[in-house]
């Protein structure tokens, strides 16, 4: 049963991890490649999974607004998160949208696209170990 569970739900968890790691890099570093990777991960997800991703963005924004000491930085971080939320909620994405986003991601950061296709969230930890 454990193997079946991992096969059925392992990819879903890894795509969530990929998304969360990309969001963290985007929010804290302002890296547009990571933003594109987060959007691509959201487009690769089911509608239900995207709802949980949007909820994560809201939670992260609230945490930043409540806990970050510098007001200017706090607003900037929150704005990034809420902008990403807005872009993910625009529509119910389909396979064509995902392919388009993957192409865009490949043009700006092939390594992120490769890791998205492999559903390897560790790319962000390797690139920015101080954030994790």
Image (cartoon, rainbow, N blue to C red):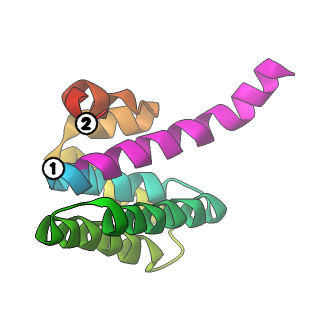
Q: Which residues are magenta?
A: 1-25
Please, what secondary structure does the residue beneath circle 1 have? helix
- Quarter residue 8 falls in: top right
Q: Which numbered circle lies on residue 29?
A: 1
Q: Residues within 10 Å of mark 1 (few under 14, many from 20)?
A: few
Which of the marked residues, 2 or 1, is nearer the chain's N terminus?
Answer: 1
Residue 102 % position (x, y): 33, 51
Residue that carries the numbered disc 2 in the rendered image:
131
**Could you give the CA–CA distance between mark 2 and mark 1, rounded to whole angstroms?**
9 Å
Circles 2 and 1: CB distance less than 8 Å?
Answer: yes
Residue 58 % position (x, y): 45, 69
Magenta: main secondary structure equals helix
Residue 119 % position (x, y): 46, 34
Quadrant where the N terminus is found in the figure = top right
Report whether residue 121 is seen.
yes
User: Is residue 3 depicted above or below 128 in this figure?
Assistant: above
Between residue 33 and residue 132, name the one nearer to us.
Answer: 132
Residue 55 % position (x, y): 53, 66
Report whether residue 104 is seen.
no
């Amino acid at each position: 049963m454990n193997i079946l569970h991992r096969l059925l739900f392992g990819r879903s968890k890894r795509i969530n991890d990929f998304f969360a790691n990309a969001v963290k890099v985007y929010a804290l570093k302002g890296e547009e490649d990571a933003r594109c990777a987060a959007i691509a991960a959201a487009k690769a997800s089911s509608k239900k999974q995207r709802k949980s991703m949007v909820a994560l963005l809201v939670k992260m924004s609230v945490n930043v607004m409540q806990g970050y000491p510098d007001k200017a930085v706090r607003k900037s971080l929150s704005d990034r998160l809420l902008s990403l939320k807005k872009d993910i909620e625009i529509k119910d994405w389909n396979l064509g949208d995902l392919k388009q986003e993957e192409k865009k991601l490949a043009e700006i950061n092939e390594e992120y696209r490769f890791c998205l296709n492999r559903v390897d969230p560790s790319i962000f930890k390797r690139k920015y170990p101080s954030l994790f």
